[in-house]
Amino acid sequence: MESNANSAILKNGLILGLIGIIITMLAYVIDITILTNIFFGLGMMVVSIILLVVMGSKYRDSELEGFIDFGPAFKFVFFASVISMVLSGIFQILLYTVIDPELPELLIEGTLQNTEELLESFGTPAEDIDKAMAETEKSLEGQFTIGGIVSNSYVYLILGAIYGLIAGAIIRKTKPEFE
């Protein structure tokens, strides 16, 4: 049973990762500024959670007779999402270093522009905008390098845990005591 769970986790993590890569490549091909839009990132998170719930529910119903406790559901979602995010990290390294080495600079420019527009829309004073822009630029420094991607990998674990909590709670279905 454990090997079935591990193979299901691996399979679904790889599928989720490939879907994320395809969506990212479509955004890249259509208009790279999509990649700097906060709603794109949030949308990817929502899509990931929905797909993890669907995959976890399918796993529960096909492999576990329709019942799974929260712990195994959390484990399924957590590890599948971490596998997906690792695959995504490898893809990002290839994208930023091999496919389009100029892309990181374009993403930084786009992010800075979006940040400035957002702050202006809130009526933020000019000196506060300048300060925020300097901080944002500093935080983006090195983020798109191999070292930056690897050093930010702890985010994968945090997101995986959040996805696991949300989707695991939705997927879990306890077997009735008296049946």
Image (spheres, helix red, strand yellow):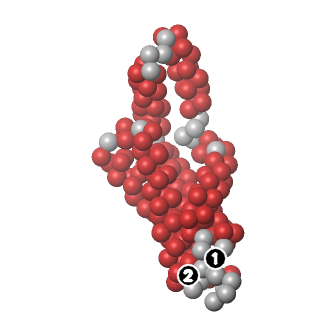
Q: In the orientation shown, which residue stands out farthest toward the bottom?
A: 179
Residue 138 visible in the current orientation:
yes
Residue at 64 percent of width and 44 percent of height: 152
Name the one closer to the observer, 178 or 51.
Answer: 178
Residue 63 visible in the current orientation:
no
Q: Secondary structure at mark 1?
A: loop
Q: The residue under label 1 is which amino acid type?
A: Thr
Which comes before the other along the chain, label 1 or label 2? 2
Q: Quadrant of the C terminus?
A: bottom right
Comparing marks 1 and 2, which lies closer to the viewer? 1
- Which quarter of the picture shows residue 69? bottom right
Query: How far across and down, in percent of the image, does residue 17 sit?
Result: 50, 61
Q: The residue under label 2 is which amino acid type?
A: Gly
Query: How far across and down, in percent of the image, does residue 65 sit?
Result: 57, 86
User: In screen coordinates, is 163 left or right of 112?
Assistant: right
Residue 174 numbered mark, or none = 1
Q: Which residue is mark 2?
A: 66
Query: How far across and down, in percent of the image, does residue 31 sit?
Result: 32, 42
Query: For the residue carrying disc 2, how many other residues have a C-alpha within 10 Å: few (<14), some (14-19), or many (20+)?
Result: some
In the rendered image, the vertical position of residue 129 relative to residue 26, given as above or below = above
- Which quarter of the picture shows residue 178? bottom right
Residue at 47 percent of width and 61 percent of height: 50
Name the one closer to the observer, 115 or 29.
Answer: 115
